[in-house]
Image (tube, grey):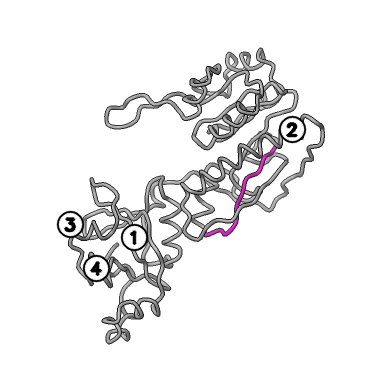
C-alpha cells in the first residue's frame, strides 16, 4: 500500500481521510490548519480533520504557514511519502512541497474542472443555478486548481438542494474517488488530462454577496442565493431597520399566486406595478410572499435578529409583517 501524507481541514476533507484510513493506507501524518478560537467564549476549536486524526491516533502537523517553512518541509521529507493527498487544505502549496512525494500531490476538488477553480466551487455552483456538478481528482501544480485532471464523477444538483446538502454528497463522493485514483496510480493505469483554457473561477465568498438584491435579481436567482448560502451565512434583507435572514424559499409564478390566493384576483391588474421586494401576502396561515423580478418569492424558513431559525408560520405568529411593506 502507498505511504501517504494527508492535508486537509474541514469536514469535506475529513471524509477523504476517513476513506484512506478505512482502506488501510499507511497514513504517515496529517497536516491541518491551526486551531482557531470560536464562539462567545472564544474556545479553541479543532478542525474536523484534526478531530478524526486524534481519534485514530495519527501524527498531526499544524504549521502556521507552509511556504518558506523549511522546518515543516524537512519534517515531510523525512516522512518520505509516496503521495500527498490534499483536500480543502486552504493554502496554495509551494513547489518545494509538491516535489517531495514519489507520485506527486493529488487533490480532490468539488467541481467538474476546469469549471469552478478556487475556494468555493460547491457554493458557486448552487448560487449560479447549475444543474450538474461533481468531483475531480488531479495532480497538483503551483497554480490554483490548474493541474492535470485524473478522475471525474458527475452528479445532478437538486432543484431545492442547499450547499450543505450538496457538500455532504460530494464529500463522500470525493473520498471514494480519491481511493479509485490511488489504486490506478498504484497499478500504473491512471491517465492524465490537461485542463486547457476554458475555465471558470469560484473565489471565496464575501459577506456582501449575502444581501438580497430585490431590484436586479430574479426570483429564481434569489432562491439560488438563499440555498447557495445555506448553511454557511444565510442570505439577508432588511425590513425597515431590521435584518432578516432567509434560509429556505420557493419561487411561485403569478399564475400560481392567483390560483392559490383567489382574493388577489380582483387586484391582479395592479400586480405588475408593485415594486420588487414588496410583501404581497403576510399571514401565519397563508405564509409570506414577496414580489420579485419574474415571479414571487415565498419564504419558508426565516431568522430574525438575535433569534433562531424558524418556519415562517411560527415567525409570523410572533412578528407582524404588513402586506405592502417592502424589503430592501
Label 1: few (<14), some (14–19) or many (≥20) C-alpha neighbours in 10 Å:
some
Residue located at (77% from left, 40% from top): 192
Alpha carbon separation for disc pair 2 and 1: 45 Å
Q: Earlier in the sequence, mark 4 or mark 3?
A: 4
- Kindly identify the residue that appears in the image at 61 percent across and 49 percent down: 134
Q: Which mark is residue 318?
A: 3
Q: Secondary structure at mark 2?
A: helix
Q: Residue at x 58, y 16 (%)?
A: 72
- Work out whether mark 2 precedes mark 3 in sequence or the reverse, and give the earlier one: 2
Q: Earlier in the sequence, mark 2 or mark 1?
A: 2
Do the numbered discs 2 and 3 sit on residues whose CB atoms are within 8 Å? no
Label 2 Cα crowd, 10 Å radius (few <14 / some 14-19 / many 20+): some
Q: Which residue position is annotated with label 4?
A: 282
How crowded pointer 3 is (Cα within 10 Å; few <14, some 14-19, many 20+) is rated as few
Location of mark 2 (residue): 183
Q: Mark 1 and mark 4: span between their CA atoms? A: 12 Å
- How far is disc 2 from disc 3 in space, using C-alphas? 57 Å
Q: Which percent across, then down, holds residue 292?
A: 37, 70
Identify the residue at horizontal 32%, vertical 86% (top origin): 269
Which is closer to the viewer, label 4 or label 2? 2
Badge 4 or badge 2: first in the primary sequence: 2
The magenta region covers 129-138
Q: What residue did someone put label 1 on? A: 300
Q: Are marks 1 and 4 in contact (CB under 8 Å)?
A: no
Task: Please report contact status of discs 3 and 1: CB closer than 8 Å, yes or no.
Answer: no
Amino acid at each position: 500500500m502507498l505511504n501517504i501524507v494527508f492535508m486537509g481541514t474541514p469536514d469535506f476533507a475529513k471524509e477523504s481521510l476517513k476513506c484512506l484510513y478505512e482502506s488501510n493506507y499507511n497514513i504517515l501524518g496529517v497536516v491541518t490548519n491551526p486551531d482557531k478560537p470560536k464562539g462567545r467564549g472564544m474556545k479553541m476549536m479543532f478542525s474536523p480533520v484534526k478531530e478524526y486524526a486524534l481519534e485514530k491516533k495519527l501524527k498531526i502537523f499544524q504549521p502556521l504557514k507552509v511556504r518558506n517553512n523549511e522546518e515543516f518541509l524537512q519534517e515531510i521529507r523525512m516522512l518520505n511519502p509516496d503521495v500527498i493527498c490534499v483536500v480543502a487544505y486552504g493554502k496554495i502549496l509551494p513547489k518545494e512541497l509538491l516535489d517531495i512525494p514519489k507520485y506527486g500531490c493529488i487533490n480532490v476538488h468539488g467541481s467538474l474542472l476546469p469549471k469552478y477553480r478556487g475556494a468555493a466551487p460547491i457554493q458557486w455552483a448552487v448560487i449560479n443555478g447549475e444543474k450538474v456538478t461533481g468531483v475531480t481528482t488531479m495532480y497538483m501544480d503551483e497554480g490554483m486548481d490548474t493541474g492535470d485532471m485524473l478522475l471525474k464523477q458527475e452528479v445532478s444538483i437538486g432543484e431545492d438542494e442547499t450547499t450543505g446538502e450538496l457538500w455532504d454528497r460530494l464529500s463522500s463522493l470525493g473520498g471514494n474517488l480519491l481511493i479509485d485514483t490511488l489504486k490506478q496510480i498504484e497499478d500504473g493505469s491512471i491517465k492524465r488530462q490537461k485542463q486547457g483554457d476554458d475555465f471558470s473561477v469560484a473565489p471565496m465568498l464575501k459577506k456582501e454577496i449575502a444581501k438580497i438584491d430585490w431590484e436586479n435579481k430574479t426570483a429564481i436567482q434569489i432562491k439560488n442565493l438563499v440555498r447557495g448560502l445555506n448553511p454557511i451565512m444565510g442570505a439577508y434583507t432588511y425590513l425597515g431597520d431590521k435584518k432578516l435572514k432567509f434560509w429556505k424559499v420557493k419561487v411561485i409564478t403569478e399564475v400560481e399566486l392567483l390560483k392559490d390566493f383567489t382574493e388577489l384576483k380582483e387586484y391582479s391588474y395592479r400586480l405588475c406595478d408593485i415594486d420588487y421586494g414588496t410583501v404581497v401576502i403576510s399571514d401565519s396561515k397563508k405564509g409570506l410572499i414577496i414580489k420579485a423580478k419574474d415571479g414571487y418569492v415565498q419564504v419558508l424558513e426565516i431568522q430574525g435578529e438575535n433569534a433562531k431559525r424558524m418556519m415562517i408560520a411560527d415567525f409570523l405568529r410572533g412578528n407582524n409583517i404588513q402586506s405592502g411593506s417592502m424589503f430592501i
